């Protein structure tokens, strides 16, 4: 794990944004490096596996609070709002993590090809799991990180690494629940289809009828399943996407607050300012000003 930790530190230290996050050129691969405790940090996670390499982070995923320390893996099985606090980090020992987005289609395909037994019953949505970090996860993550130095190999090598990563997750003690979440006709996958539409078109109004049609549900059933899966209503989910993207535009791209508001679909800057302040605890001009220095 030490080699992976050093590789993540070198890349993240050079490329992290103001929040310590790195969106790497390798699709679905992100890193984080934080030299001091911080938070709250708000985001909307896709399904992913996060390897905690150093330090500790508290995560509230859809209302469920967990503490993850170095040597642990956090598995988020559905699209969900996350509030994170870095609780253990120092300048000489920063918090370090690497996250890899999951593909439920790969999970389902592998589940069909492996004899892992039937999926569990429909007892409810489990959004986040914890496991000990093992050599299989470290190996897969290390090879994905290595692709940063070999971009020409990405299209050939990355699919095989992702197949292996998803296989080991299915073979873990959380495999049965991941199998259930990956079922094409299951509620989680149908909601995920609507969430993908929201992610693609969050800047414009999205009637619930259109979203429920995509999920092949009635509007009332869709609202119920959406809230059960994500802990948010569809409108709340879209609003958080808009605000998170606006913050990224200000911090990473140097946009003004009014420009960021327009870019994410707000017609009213005062409304944007109010909602941004409620979510992030300060007006958007604070983050816009911070990006200027």
Image (cartoon, grey):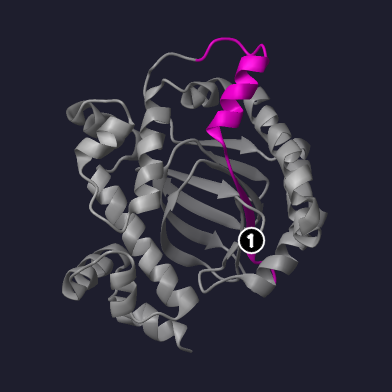
Element at label 1: loop
- The correct choice, above or below, for 241 with respect to 65 in the image is below
Q: Nearer the viewer, residue 18 or 209?
A: 209
x and y, in percent, of residue 82 in the image: 41, 50
For the residue carrying disc 1, how many other residues have a C-alpha within 10 Å: few (<14), some (14-19), or many (20+)?
Answer: some
| Residue 274 shown left or right of residue 99 in the figure | left
Residue drawn 64% across the image and 30% down it: 169
Q: Nearer the viewer, residue 75 or 242?
A: 242
Residue drawn 56% across the image and 47% down it: 68
Q: Nearer the viewer, residue 153 or 178?
A: 153
Task: Read off the magenta span.
Answer: 92-119
x and y, in percent, of residue 122 in the image: 39, 17
| Residue 41 shown left or right of residue 165 in the figure | left
What residue is shown with label 1?
24
Residue 219 belongs to magenta span: no
Residue 102 belongs to magenta span: yes
| Residue 154 shown left or right of residue 126 in the figure | right
Residue drawn 52% across the image and 67% down it: 37
């Amino acid at each position: 794990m030490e080699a992976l930790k050093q590789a993540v530190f070198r890349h993240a230290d050079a490329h992290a944004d103001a929040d310590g996050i790195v969106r790497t050129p390798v699709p679905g691969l992100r890193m984080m490096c934080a030299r001091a405790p911080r938070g709250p940090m708000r985001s909307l996670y896709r399904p992913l596996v996060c390897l905690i390499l150093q330090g500790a982070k508290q995560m509230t995923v859809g209302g469920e609070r967990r503490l993850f320390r170095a040597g642990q893996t956090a598995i988020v099985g559905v699209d969900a709002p996350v509030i994170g606090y870095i609780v253990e980090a120092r300048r000489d020992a920063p918090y370090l993590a690497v996250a890899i987005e999951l593909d439920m289609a790969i999970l389902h395909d592998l589940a069909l090809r492996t004899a892992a037994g039937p999926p569990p019953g429909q007892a409810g949505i489990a959004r986040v799991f914890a496991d000990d970090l093992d050599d299989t996860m470290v190996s897969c993550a290390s090879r994905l990180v290595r692709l940063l130095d070999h971009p020409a190999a990405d299209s050939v090598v990355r699919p095989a690494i992702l197949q292996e990563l998803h296989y080991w997750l299915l073979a873990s003690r959380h495999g049965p629940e991941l199998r259930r979440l990956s079922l094409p006709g299951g509620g989680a996958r149908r909601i995920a289809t609507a969430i993908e539409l929201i992610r693609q078109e969050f800047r414009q109004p999205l009637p619930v009828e259109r979203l429920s049609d995509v999920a092949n549900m009635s509007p009332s059933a869709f609202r119920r399943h959406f809230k059960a899966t994500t802990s948010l209503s569809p409108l709340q989910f879209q609003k958080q996407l808009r605000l998170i993207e606006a913050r990224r535009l200000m911090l990473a791209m140097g946009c003004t607050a009014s420009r960021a508001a327009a870019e994410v679909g707000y017609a009213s800057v005062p409304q944007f300012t109010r909602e941004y302040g409620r979510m992030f605890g300060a007006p958007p001009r604070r983050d816009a000003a911070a990006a200027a220095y």
